[in-house]
Every structure is written in structure tokens, then in C-alpha cells.
Image (spheres, rainbow, N blue to C red):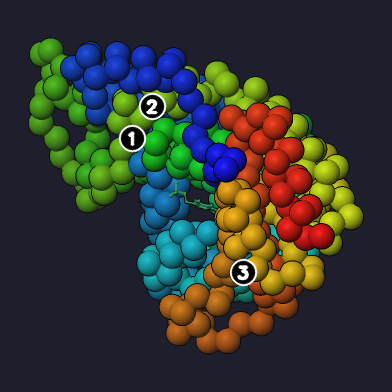
Amino acid sequence: MNEFIPMSRPYYDEEEIEEVVKVLRSGWITTGPRCREFEERFAALAGAPQAVALTSATAGLHLVLRALEIGNGDEVVTPSMTFASTVNQIVLAGARPVFVDCDYDTLMPGAEDYARAVTKRTRALIPVHFAGAPADLDAIEEAAAGVPVIEDAAHAIDTRYKGRHIGGKNTAIFSFHPIKNITTGEGGMVTGSDDTLMRRLRLLRFHGIERDAWKRYGKASDPGYDIAEPGFKYNMTDIQAVLGLVQMKKIAAITRRRAEIARAYLDGLKGTGLDLPGTPNYDHQHSWHLFVVKLRAMERQDFMAALAEENIGYGLHFPACHTLSFIKRLCGMVKLPVTEEVAARIVSLPIHPGMDTAQVQRVVEGVRGVLS
Ligand SMILES: Cc1ncc(COP(=O)(O)O)c(C=O)c1O
């Protein structure tokens, strides 16, 4: 029997392991100098003046909505075709999610979809850079007409829009969950240029305390503190940060390998009765975080069962958010025809840089065989 090919697998080697061991040996394992270094390096990658490291992108969404004081009576416009985390945070903040439909090929809404959804109550737009492709930021900002655009960049490490890395323009939230293009085990990063907002995020991520713990516990330091606004406990540890620092050195190679696998699928799966992922028609670099196909003739349950027989993994990104039970209770019936159509047909195929050519070929042949 062939070995199992998972849909995703984190990509790290001895270098990450050695760096983690060094942090463990150093005696300082929580938020400290390595975390600061990771923030600086990530901000430079994104082309943003500042970055704040957190325990997850979900924590980032929570803190950004809170820092912008978005809550009761406010509306936040976002795609339904996204991970539930985005929508959970909008609802938990007390605001109402207003969902926009998506394009069949890219699975992202167009600017006109956002423009139609903006009302007097809209406090933010949260576009999602889906599967590693960038949303059309210039057009979406125009549609926002001055309302803040917060980018869900969980899939967008090494994604570029018109020559610039995502995160250099608006407040953007990245994820380092193990499925993501680089990982810190769990983790997230907010990049941005609004000094007041970024300062508030730093406070809110650690109880509302002004200074980092490693400065309070240093030699001859002042261990006292004051709290002007109570905060949460979302600080990234140095153990996680060194993982991120080593992973960052590998980003170009990771994107290259992901793009090669995507190319092999785009060529090898032509004419199989699958709709292959469409890419945006504006200048961009795709980071191929996910490879999402749409089934045309075969039931998804049968397709997934047949892939399992072949020892090939798969994923589902994502169930449409507007059809989740708690959203139906909150928002009633919302009709988004394209999202509903694609949500029933999408399947994510294995894509991760550790896959070798033989494994990629096995996926191509396995999928072709299942569909024939
Ligand atoms: C689009 C999107 N937003 C947000 C998140 C949340 O990321 P995290 O797991 O780091 O909280 C994810 C995670 O998969 C995601 O796919």
C-alpha cells in the first residue's frame, strides 16, 4: 500500500529544532527579544512600519475589532467563503456580519460585491486573501469609501498584490497555524501603520500592561506596572518566534515549491471534469496556500471516499459561513447563490513543500483515476 499523502504538513527541519532548543536552554522562553526580532523581520517582509506577534490570527481579529471599538449595532462586511474564525470574532464583538457572495473561479468577492453591502452602519470591511491569492485591494478600498479595510491575510504569506507584499497598506492579520505557508506551531501577526492602533494592540495582547515582561524581570528593572485598560493574554512566546524566524528564511523556496505543485496539478488535471482554481486577472504573486478544485459531475462524499481508498488526503475550505447554525439564528436566511453552489463542490487537494515529484504524480493519477 502506498503511504498516506496528507493535505498539509508543516515544513521544518533540524535548523528549527536547534533554534527552539537554544531558546529552551537560554532560560527565557516566553515573549522576549526573539519575538521582537520576528516582529521586525515580518514587518520588513510585509513592507509595514510595525508588526505585533500574537498567539493566533483569531486573536488578531479579536484585538483589532476591539481596538477599533467595533461592537453593538455595527456592521462588518466580509465574505461567507472564509474560515469561521473571521465571522466568529465579528459576532463575538457584538457586531453583525454582512456577507458578500464570491466569484466562481477565484472564490473571492469582487469590489462591486463589497460596494453593494456597505451601509451607514458599516464600520469595517474584512476582505480575505483566499488560498494564497490576493483580493483586489485597490478596488475594494474604493468600494469602502473611507470605511477601514482590515485584511484577513491568514493565507497570504508571500502573497503579492501589484508588486507589494500583503500587509504593507492596511491593517492585516496573518496566521502561522501548522497548515499555513510558514508556521510557529500556533501564532499570528498583525501588521499596520496606524501608531495608535498598533500601540493599543500591544497593550491588549498582555493584560493591558505597558512593558514587556522580559524588561520588568531584567537586572535592576522596575517590576511595577499600571493598567489603563484591561487586556487579554495573547502574547507570542520566544519558542514560537524562533520557529518563525527560521521559517522566514525559507519563504522563497516554500513558495517556489508550492507553485511547482500547483502548476503540475493545473496541467495534469485538465479535462478531468474538475473546475480548477482560477487566478485573479490583476498583477499578483500567488503563494498557493491551498489548491481548491470544484467537482462538476461527482458527489463530494464519493470523491473523498475514493481519495481515501487511494491513501490521498483532502480538505474542505470552507463550509459557507452564512449557512452555519448560529449565523442562521442571528442573520436569518441569507442568499448567496455562487457561494452556496461552490460550497457544495469544493475539495482541497494536498499541497505542501515537502511533497516530492512522485507524490504529486500520485495525486494527479489518483484524482484522474477516481474521476474516470
Ligand atoms: C481565512 C482565515 N482566517 C483566519 C484564520 C484563523 O487563523 P488562526 O488559526 O491562526 O487563528 C484562518 C485559519 O485557518 C483562516 O483560514
Element at label 3: helix
Instruction: Give the image quarter of residue 26.
Output: top left
Residue to which mark 2 is pinned = 241
Upstream in sequence: badge 1 or badge 2: 1
Q: Nearer the viewer, mark 1 or mark 3?
A: 3
Kind of residue sitting beneath label 2: Ala
Q: In the displayed structure, does residue 166 sit left or right of residue 50?
A: right
Upstream in sequence: badge 2 or badge 3: 2
Element at label 2: helix
Residue to which mark 1 is pinned = 236
Label 2 crowd bin: few (<14), some (14–19), many (20+), radius 10 Å: many
Q: Considering only vertical position in the picture, is 77 above or below 195?
A: below
Label 1 crowd bin: few (<14), some (14–19), many (20+), radius 10 Å: many
- Please give the name of the residue rendered at 63% of the width and 51% of the height, measured from the top-left corner: 310
Q: CA distance from mark 1 to mark 3?
A: 39 Å
Kind of residue sitting beneath label 3: Gln
Kind of residue sitting beneath label 1: Met
Upstream in sequence: badge 1 or badge 3: 1
Q: In the displayed structure, does residue 106 sit left or right of residue 331?
A: right
Q: Position of residue 37 (x, y in %)?
A: 41, 20
- State the quadrant of the N terminus: top right
Proximity of marks 1 and 2: CB atoms separated by less than 8 Å: yes
- Please give the name of the residue rendered at 85% of the width and 42% of the height, measured from the top-left corner: 267
Q: Position of residue 270 (x, y in %)?
A: 87, 50
Q: Considering only vertical position in the picture, is 201 above or below 143?
A: above
Q: CA distance from mark 2 to mark 3?
A: 39 Å
Q: Is residue 255 visible?
A: no
